[in-house]
Amino acid sequence: MKKVIGLGMVILTVLASPIHAAAPTPGSADDPVVTKSYLEQYVQGLGGSVGTGGGSNGLTESKIKEIIAQEIAKLPTNNGGGGTPSTGQGNAMKVVALKAGQTILADAGSELIVRNGKTLAVSNDDNGIPDVTAGKDLAAGTVVQNNHLLIFPRDGRGVKPDLKETADVYVMVRGGYVVQNADGSKVPQ
């Protein structure tokens, strides 16, 4: 029995040797893992070095920083003061007064809070408006509670003062919106 086990061990050793011999040595060109030293050797072989601009593209680190600075300068800035467009787009909430018969229609992604007065939800479809404060959807014609945050997932939804409301209704809006009169004409901003 001992001879059989010994013979089995010898056979396994002989069979396993080619598997180990076929494995690449770490750090060699045959190693599938790319190391930093391999990349540096490869870049040196191309005749350049990383980040110094010695390569064929001519981009130096300072040139890359200059290009990035130019692109950043092109981006619009929102410093929080005076730069908010009249459409209400931007980070700041804008206070809008609604007169009797007017409707405010919010753009997709806009937020609105009714500050005073009695208002009704307006929607051009059956999905309604999410009232995130109450955790429910407001169908068209539903009373909107004051100081509740409404988020508009699509265009064509908004709020309007109740027909019995005679005083101005104030709402706060973040995002795009349009105020319309009862006849459908737009109120200039």
Image (spheres, rainbow, N blue to C red):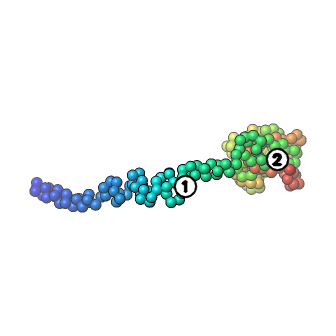
Q: Amino acid at mark 1?
A: Leu
Disc 1 target residue = 59
Tell me: 126 left or right of 9.
right
- Where 187 sits versus 79, above or below? below
Q: Where is residue 29 drawn, in percent x and y? A: 35, 59
Who is closer to the viewer here, 13 or 70?
A: 70
Q: Amino acid at mark 2?
A: Lys
Nearest to N terminus: mark 1 or mark 2 = 1
Image quarter of residue 24: bottom left
Q: Where is residue 70 drawn, in percent x and y? A: 64, 50
Query: What element does badge 1 sit on?
Result: loop
Tell me: 171 left or right of 72.
right
Image quarter of residue 84: top right
Which dot marks residue 160? Answer: 2
Residue drawn where x is 49% and y is 55% of the image: 54
Residue drawn where x is 53% and y is 59% of the image: 57
Who is closer to the viewer here, 188 or 7?
A: 188
Residue drawn where x is 86% and y is 50% of the image: 188
Q: Where is residue 129 drawn, in percent x and y? A: 72, 49
Q: Where is residue 165 drawn, in percent x and y? A: 87, 42
Residue drawn where x is 24% and y is 61% of the image: 18
